[in-house]
Image (cartoon, rainbow, N blue to C red):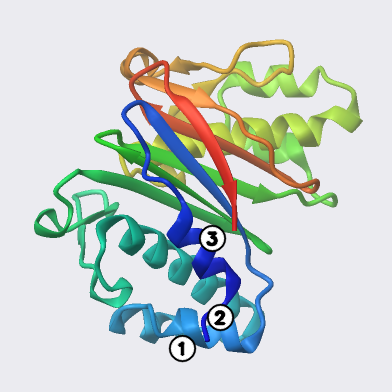
Amino acid sequence: MESAPFTKIEQLPAPASKDIHVIIADLTIDPELQEQLFMRLSDDEQKRAGRFKLDKHRRRFIAAHGYLRHLLAAHLETAPAGLLYHYGKTGKPVIAKDQNPDNLCFNLSHSHELAVFALALNTPVGIDIEHVRKNFDPLGLAKRYFSNNEFNQISTLPKKQQTAAFYHAWTRKEAVLKVSGQGITRIETVEVTILDNEPLRIISPEKRAGTCSLYSFTVPDGYTAALAAEGHNHSLVTFHI
């Protein structure tokens, strides 16, 4: 007997034009559900799962990638394990064209015990979620990875607000990079708005600022998340599984 999350996934509507579906999933699953999700992975993903030394890391990987395959397969009406991913020059996965007539685009991020997924039609998306760590040096990391303007903004904030500002910046920058499949090694090349009283937007590079939009959405306490998408004026619809 399959678990409740699968029923929820299969009942989700398909995203309409200009819609972006954001799905939030809890990765604290029981062994039975973990086994069901493991069987939805590809052979390569099952091998990757087996390389994790810690059970909690293996469980989180299986849950995140198993849920993703079930989400995509439910929309494409195919078997989750049979979905084929192709990888672009930057390594970003896309669904094989012959399995994806409606050009369903997707992205995944997971951190600690939560995963977030973004789904959209004909719209490249990037999503990021981070579990907020309390005992770290936000200014030291901002000095290393952020623009001078971003660092200066964070450094002028009261100490209690610096951690939140750092995570706002990090998730927004990473979401923008993930739209085109670039990784965090280029995080210093993107500048975004950070402060609560500023509208979300990309400041640089100019090409990204003109063609890509930034959005926020609500996640549980202890996490920060952001979404980026090609184009403008999208409608975000959030689901929990």
- Give the percent coordinates (x, y) of residue 61: 52, 72
Counting residues from the start of the chain, the first of labels 3 and 2 encountered is 3
Residue at position x 50%, y 24% from top? 214
Query: Quadrant of residue 56 in the image?
Result: bottom right
Task: State if disc 1 and disc 2 touch (CB < 8 Å).
Answer: yes
Mark 1 Cα within 10 Å, few/some/many (few <14, many 20+)? some
* Location of mark 1 (residue): 50
Q: Which mark is residue 8?
A: 3
Q: Quarter of the image containing the C terminus?
A: bottom right
Real-space Cα separation, disc 1 to disc 3, in angstroms: 28 Å
170 over 70 or under it: above or below: above
Residue at position x 44%, y 68% from top? 65
Residue at position x 34%, y 33% from top? 16
Residue at position x 40%, y 30% from top? 19
**Res 147 visible:** yes
Q: Secondary structure at mark 3?
A: helix
Q: Amino acid at mark 1?
A: Gly
Q: Is residue 83 left or right of residue 14?
A: left
Q: Is residue 8 left or right of residue 219?
A: left
Q: Amino acid at mark 3?
A: Lys
211 over 139 or under it: above or below: above
Q: Is residue 112 left or right of residue 82?
A: right
Counting residues from the start of the chain, the first of labels 1 and 3 encountered is 3
- In the foreground, 85 or 69: 69
- In the foreground, 41 or 155: 41
217 over 58 or under it: above or below: above
* Location of mark 2 (residue): 58
Real-space Cα separation, disc 2 to disc 1, in angstroms: 7 Å
Task: State if disc 2 and disc 3 touch (CB < 8 Å).
Answer: no
Which one is in front in this view, the residue at disc 3 or the one at disc 2?
A: 3
Counting residues from the start of the chain, the first of labels 2 and 1 encountered is 1
